[in-house]
């Protein structure tokens, strides 16, 4: 019986996502044995500093990639929003699964919307993108960094540390915590991280049999949409921890891409929005990035460095 080993982080959400991929593969190939290889990463271990301060979300990938290179695993499962815009050789994204809800979620035990929060309310999120949009819409809020897994963050809210926190809707839905969502922060007014809501499977380019196996999980519309979002971020020389939001969707036989760049310090935002034919996703991403730069995005990105 062939064996496929999936490297995964140890968090509850990462394990759910990896087991979901494993279950899909077992259903497609009943003769395939699929096992998880849970691992701790530096991004999971260093919780007293922001991700931007310790190297960004790429820290969640490195140990998993090393496990593949050592031969301890055959592939790795990631939240696509955590995957760097450029993968190092010899890695590729062999599968991008159908996207779940890409929106962010406002979670509060007492307030039903962003507008309902009282003046000076304490809101926590470690994302500079979320902080920039929060400051743009509610400059009166007090914002705080928040690290840890989903349950750790919810516990801090429930303990009264904050009036609200912001997480991804997709992660909450996957863990059966959708009832905790007070309000969706969604396009077009509020833009998610590039690739948010999609699960990606990474493997080595030369492992053809693994690539062929994983290709059956790939969702082409999702791949095209997130490719445009990531192309925009790449053209901005962005990463997973800069205040950049993007959302692409299928519209009128093509793709529509919305982009935003913000400043977490003062809430300034610049936006751009374009449509193109579906086969031109890289061009669309670059074009939206150029419009953002023309509108002043370079200054906002420089303020993050």
Image (spheres, rainbow, N blue to C red):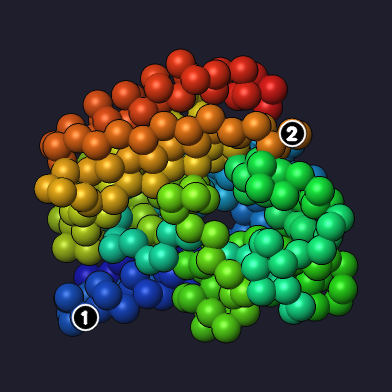
In this rendering, would 76 be left or right of 244? left
At 21% across and 59% down in the image, what residue appears? 219
| Image spot of residue 260 (x, y percent) | 50, 36
In this rendering, would 107 be left or right of 82? right
Indicate the secondary structure of the residue bearing disc 2: loop
Indicate the secondary structure of the residue bearing disc 1: helix
| Image spot of residue 157 (x, y percent) | 79, 71
In this rendering, would 251 be left or right of 247? left
Check disc 1 and report the residue beneath it.
Answer: 27
Mark 2 crowd level (few <14, some 14–19, many ≥20, 10 Å Cα): some
Q: Which mark is residue 172?
A: none
Mark 1 crowd level (few <14, some 14–19, many ≥20, 10 Å Cα): few
Above or below, 89 against 17 in this view is above
Say which quadrant the C terminus sits in: top right
At 60% across and 24% down in the image, what residue appears? 301
Considering depth in this image, is 250 or 140 the residue closer to the camera? 140
At 17% across and 63% down in the image, what residue appears? 216
At 33% across and 46% down in the image, what residue appears? 248
Q: Nearer the viewer, mark 1 or mark 2?
A: 2
Q: Which mark is residue 266?
A: 2
């Amino acid at each position: 019986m062939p064996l496929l080993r999936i490297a995964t982080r140890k968090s509850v959400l990462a394990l759910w996502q990896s087991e979901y991929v494993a279950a899909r593969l077992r259903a497609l190939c009943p003769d395939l044995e699929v096992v998880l290889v849970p691992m701790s990463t530096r991004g999971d271990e260093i919780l007293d500093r922001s991700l931007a301060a310790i190297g960004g979300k790429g820290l969640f990938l490195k140990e998993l990639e090393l496990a593949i290179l050592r031969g301890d695993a055959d592939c790795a499962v990631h939240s696509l929003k955590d995957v760097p815009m450029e993968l190092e050789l010899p890695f590729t994204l062999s599968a991008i699964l159908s996207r779940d809800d890409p929106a962010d979620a406002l979670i509060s035990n007492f307030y039903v919307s962003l507008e309902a929060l009282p003046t000076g309310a304490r809101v926590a999120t470690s994302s500079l993108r979320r902080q920039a949009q929060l400051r743009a819409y509610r400059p009166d809020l007090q914002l705080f960094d928040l690290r840890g897994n989903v349950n750790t963050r919810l516990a801090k809210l429930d303990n009264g540390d904050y009036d609200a926190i912001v997480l991804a809707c997709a992660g909450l839905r996957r863990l059966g915590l959708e009832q905790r969502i007070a309000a969706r922060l969604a396009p077009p007014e509020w833009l998610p991280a590039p690739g948010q809501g999609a699960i990606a499977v990474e493997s080595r380019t030369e492992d053809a049999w693994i690539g062929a196996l994983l290709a059956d999980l790939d969702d082409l519309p999702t791949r095209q949409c997130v490719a445009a979002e990531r192309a925009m971020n790449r053209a901005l020389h962005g990463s997973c921890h800069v205040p950049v939001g993007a959302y692409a969707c299928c519209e009128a036989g093509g793709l529509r891409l919305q982009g935003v760049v913000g400043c977490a310090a003062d809430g300034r935002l610049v936006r751009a929005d374009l449509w193109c034919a579906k086969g031109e996703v890289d061009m669309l991403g670059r074009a939206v990035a150029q419009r953002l730069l023309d509108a002043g995005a370079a200054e906002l990105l420089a303020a993050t460095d």
